[in-house]
Image (cartoon, rainbow, N blue to C red):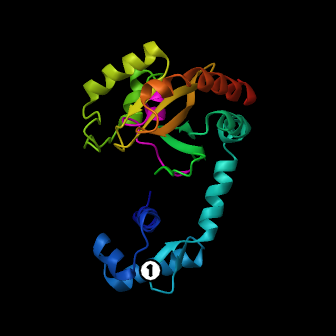
């Protein structure tokens, strides 16, 4: 990848996380303000960034539309949509569908809690594989080489007191997940939520995962575990829907 393309991608990541001005981006990337301004003008010209009235830059709608097209072209999301919403009518909790795309796990669908509690996750964002239910459900089904690839570059800095912080501890947890058939996030990314997750499998291996998330003070893991059979049946229906 050329340096200019790589930098443009990093600028888009930066303004996706938070609106930023030319001056802020110039400092962040170590560039002269005039150079950063030209970079942003180019991104504006192709419809990937837009300047707001306060001078900060955000993602533009053309880039959002391209992302939407990409998500709609993912067979797993299309196959899961109706089944996930049917399950949501029964459980009411937040549901996520994640897909394994090359060596990255990505959220491809989400239905929010009926009680109005919103989770951090966003459709299209990357999943942290070592401290999420869907991440561990997928990792547990992978062989060592593929697991290494997905975990390459993992930042083991803890997010909560319960975050797994080493590969050895994670591998031990994944052995338990594999034996049990489903994974948990026990307040490992956000200390006020937990979840259970099951893999979505094809004949050639795992392709994604389905999870159910709740506020810990409302439903603990034992209560969520009672929903695992429902998740597993829905995951099987999704697999059949996509032709597996």
Q: Which residue is mark 1?
A: 56
Q: Quadrant of residue 230?
A: top right
In the image, residue 22 lies at what x, y percent? 38, 81
How crowded pointer 1 is (Cα within 10 Å; few <14, some 14-19, many 20+) is rated as: some
In the image, residue 146 lies at what x, y percent? 43, 28
- Does residue 72 appear left or right of residue 136 in this picture? right
- Does residue 207 appear left or right of residue 137 in this picture? right
| Segment tinted magenta in the rendering | 122-139
Position of residue 87 relative to residue 126, above or below, is above
Query: In the rendered image, which quarter contains the N terminus?
Result: bottom left
- Inspect the magenta stretch and tell me whether residue 206 lies in it: no
Position of residue 109 relative to residue 226, above or below, is below
The kind of secondary structure the magenta stretch mainly shows is loop
Query: Which of these two is toward me, 1 or 132?
Result: 132
In the image, residue 129 lies at what x, y percent? 41, 37
Q: Secondary structure at mark 1?
A: loop
Q: Is residue 146 among the parts visible in the rendering?
A: no
Q: Is residue 161 among the parts visible in the rendering?
A: yes
- Does residue 241 appear left or right of residue 13 in this picture? right
- Inspect the magenta stretch and tell me whether residue 133 lies in it: yes
Picture residue at 40% right of the left edge, 42% below the top: 128
Q: Quadrant of residue 66?
A: bottom right
Picture residue at 40% right of the left edge, 75% below the top: 20
Position of residue 17 relative to residue 39, above or below, is above
Query: Which of these two is toward me, 77 or 36?
Result: 77
């Amino acid at each position: 990848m050329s340096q200019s393309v790589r930098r443009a991608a990093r600028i888009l990541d930066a303004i996706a996380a938070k609106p930023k001005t030319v001056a802020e981006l110039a400092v962040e990337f170590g560039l002269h303000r005039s150079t950063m301004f030209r970079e942003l003008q180019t991104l504006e010209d192709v419809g990937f960034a837009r300047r707001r009235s306060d001078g900060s830059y955000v993602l533009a709608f053309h880039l959002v539309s391209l992302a939407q097209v990409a998500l709609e072209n993912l067979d797993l999301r299309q196959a899961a949509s109706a089944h996930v919403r049917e399950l949501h009518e029964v459980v009411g909790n937040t549901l996520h569908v994640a897909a394994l795309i090359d060596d990255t796990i990505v959220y491809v669908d989400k239905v929010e809690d009926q009680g109005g509690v919103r989770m951090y996750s966003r459709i299209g964002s990357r999943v942290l594989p070592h401290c999420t239910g869907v991440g561990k459900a997928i990792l547990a089904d992978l062989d060592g080489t593929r697991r290494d690839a997905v975990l390459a570059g993992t930042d083991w800095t803890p997010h909560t007191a319960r975050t797994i912080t080493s590969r050895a501890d994670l591998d031990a947890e994944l052995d338990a997940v594999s034996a049990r058939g489903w994974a948990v996030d026990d307040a490992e990314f956000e200390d006020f939520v937990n979840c259970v997750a099951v893999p979505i499998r094809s004949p050639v291996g795992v392709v994604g995962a389905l999870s159910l998330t709740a506020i810990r003070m409302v439903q603990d893991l034992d209560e969520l575990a009672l929903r695992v059979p429902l998740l597993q049946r829905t995951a099987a229906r999704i697999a059949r829907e996509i032709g597996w």
